[in-house]
Image: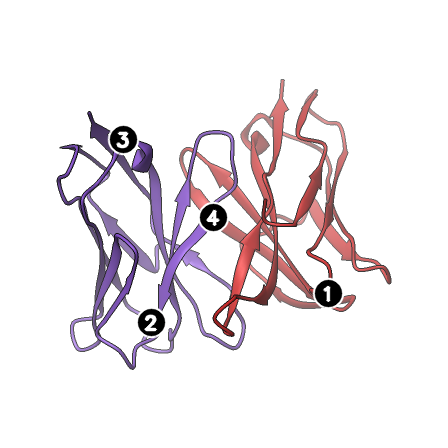
Amino acid sequence: DSGVTQTPKHLITATGQRVTLRCSPRSGDLSVYWYQQSLDQGLQFLIHYYNGEERAKGNILERFSAQQFPDLHSELNLSSLELGDSALYFCASKGQTSLGGNTIYFGEGSWLTVV
Amino acid sequence: QQQVKQSPQSLIVQKGGIPIINCAYENTAFDYFPWYQQFPGKGPALLIAIRPDVSEKKEGRFTISFNKSAKQFSLHIMDSQPGDSATYFCAASRANDYKLSFGAGTTVTVRA
């Protein structure tokens, strides 16, 4: 168990709809990263938040947005959904390893199916 | 554009064999190179990571070899076991942002 919690685990929705994915980072971690994993694109970085502020954007569509709240949980909002948005969405947080360095810990993901 | 290229796409070994997965990167600003292991239905889990100031790192049966001049790094799984059957991803980032660029993944199957 990485300590990163994501909900929901599975979600099926129709094209054109909007969904919200939720993430709670590991206790004490201030950073939250969102990644998308699909068969054709692999694991792609979407966006990074640190202590409520956006720090970096990757291959995130304009139809997608995210935010990090004062309690450090984060939400990824996906709107005007298309069939191609079907993917596994991962949240990750940055924290220290047992050896003292930093690394990224991933949650178990939210499976989104757009029909 | 894919910043980290990973090969092979899949491989099958017998128990006790040594699967080797290779990765290459272009961005010389990368200075953090982790490997992740992913089982079906689970998130990627950190396996081992290396920084460019060392050429090799071992953790248990997993070894990373790193060649900074060639901009390549590889994962060796020593004495592989059926429980090692998973998809392995190499990744790279700058250590100050941890914005990981992932390879395409290698599916390893270890046959008993």
Q: CA distance from mark 4 to mark 3?
A: 18 Å
Q: Are marks 2 and 4 in contact (CB under 8 Å)?
A: no
Q: CA distance from mark 3 to mark 1?
A: 35 Å
- Residue B73 location (% of width, % of height): 23, 63
Badge 2 marks a residue whose secondary structure is loop
Residue occupied by mark 2: B27
Chain A, colour shown: red
Query: How dense is the environment of label 2, judged by Cα within 10 Å: few (below 14), some, or many (20 and up)?
Result: few
Q: Which mark is residue B40?
A: none
In the image, what residue occupies the spot 65% across and 50% down? A3
Query: Is residue A77 positioned above or below B56 on the image?
Result: above
Q: CA distance from mark 1 to mark 4?
A: 19 Å
Q: Quick one: label 2 or label 4, which is nearer the N terminus?
A: 2
Q: Quick one: label 3 or label 2, which is nearer the N terminus?
A: 2
Pointer 4 indicates a residue of which chain? B
Q: Amino acid at mark 1?
A: Gly
